[in-house]
Amino acid sequence: MTRRQLLGAAASVGGGFPHISNAQTRRPNIIFVMTDDQRWDAMSCVGNPILRTPHMDRLAEEGVRFTDAFVTNALCSPSRGCILTGQYSHAHGVTTNGGKSHYFRPGITTFPMLLQRAGYYSAVVGKWHIATLPEGLGFDHWCILPGQGSYVDPVMIANGGRVQFRGNSEDVVGDQALETLRSRPKDKPFCLLYHFKAPHRAWIPAERFRQVYDDITIPEPPTFNTGLDDRPECVRNSDMQIADMPDFRERGVPAHLPREERKRLNYQVFMKNYYRTLLGVDENLGRVLDFLDKQGLRENTIVIYTGDNGFFQGEYGMFDKRLMYEPSIRVPMLVRYPAAVKPRVDREHMVLNNDVFHTVLDYAGIPLPKETEHHGMSWRPVLEGRAATWRDSWFYEYFEYPGAHCAPIHRGVRTRRFKLIHYLQAPQAWELFDLEKDPEERRNLYADPAHRAAVAKLREELERWRNVLKDDRSADNTPIAPCTSRMARL
């Protein structure tokens, strides 16, 4: 069966839905674009000195760019679950990247389910990375990468059957997005989830990008050579050091080199390939934006662009994500909707990945399920420039221990100025950062007598959020279990 036949067969499923009225067809179309591990400043519109992303910039120039966008769990699968359900990961059940907690809890509701019931044609193409497959979760068509997927000649699961594709994953996913849009029922509004594998490890770019950046040196961040000696024990024991990455031995970084030299070389190889894979994302984003323009769909289509979590790029010598530090939790967030939203940069509102669910349903005119109350907010009043009561703090959680990279179980609360982190396993520890005075999070102020009042207030706020969100996980006073990182095999 060809790709077009697969898509045509999926589209025919929509015949069982009620008749769509003219009023319904005027509801906005939705394209939700997500990358994997793209941090907030990996776009040229933010001022990145190396990376050029004209199509991400195009979205930013034609819509709203949120400067303060965050994820509530900086791990791929839990974050994806938060976006789909509008709930925190402890509520929807996907708390890790594998095992029993890689599945949604029974009876979960996704925003594509609600859109589909309301008459939308709904599809997902690209990276999915949740053990619960899309079938039954609100998709008329799905074509996904199994697990992490492959950068080169990927196999994809198309409506339950495996199909072999040729080429780089970003181009293949781009092809699938365009096929889906061309083959969709034309009498329905549509929702397309357009998910890239890049820039996830192992950073294998398309052939046409493999020599880009060969002639430059990527600047190292200010804290590149700052160690973790003054961090809590559980942070020191995490396994995220660029110097220890095994990936690049086959790419010409000898293992016998002194550690600091290996660290610098690993960083250059990692960063250049990270950026190269994003060049493929940007091109394929542009293909879909061009399609909307040519088909007259631009005005009434909401395009949301984000990443599933941030990423360390050498801060404290680290890579990966998971920890509640800024490089890990902060993501790009672009929203374009020409029919109702005027372009601008929003530096005022803290927005979350959980909010996507609430925003999409608000614009589609669909009531929110009761279980999502307090878990997110609709951006609609903010996007449209109307007065809105907005959050002044938000809650973070991370659960995967033991596991890859040995990041500790922790939770925290962030305001515009302060961040409080509680590491839950023995020996328990706390961190407090003044983000206004210390944006690089160099100094832990938790034990500083001058910040005793701030600590008390933030601990109270953390407990308030736990009560509101029904987070019943207790701290563990037993000694922390040993963790053997699987970094070399990931």
Image (cartoon, helix red, strand yellow):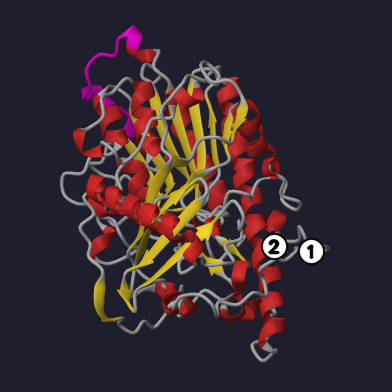
Magenta residues, as a range?
Answer: 9-23
- The image position of residue 340, as x and y in percent, is 51, 17
At x 37%, y 16%, the residue is: 187
User: Label 2 sits on what residue type?
Assistant: Lys
Q: Residue furthest bottom?
A: 256
Please, what secondary structure does the residue beneath circle 2 have? helix
Is 226 in front, or is 406? 226
Q: Earlier in the sequence, mark 1 or mark 2?
A: 1
Q: Amino acid at mark 1?
A: Asp
Tell whether label 2 touches label 1 (CB within 8 Å): yes
Which residue is located at x 64 percent, y 88 percent?
255
**Badge number at residue 424:** none
Residue 272 circle label: 2
- Residue 443 position in % (x across, y down): 57, 67
Location of residue 125 (image quadrant) = top left
Element under disc 1: loop
**Secondary structure character of the magenta stretch overall:** helix
Image check: 296 left or right of 356?
Answer: right
Viewport quadrant of the N terminus: top left
Where residue 76 sits: x, y (%)?
Answer: 41, 57
Residue 179's spot in the image, x, y percent?
A: 48, 35
Circle 2 packing at 10 Å, graded few (<14), some (14-19), many (20+), is: many
The magenta stretch spans residue 12 = yes
List the residue tagged with mark 1.
214
408 within the magenta span = no
Q: Is residue 8 left or right of residue 219?
A: left
- Drawn side of residue 253 relative to residue 422, left or right: right
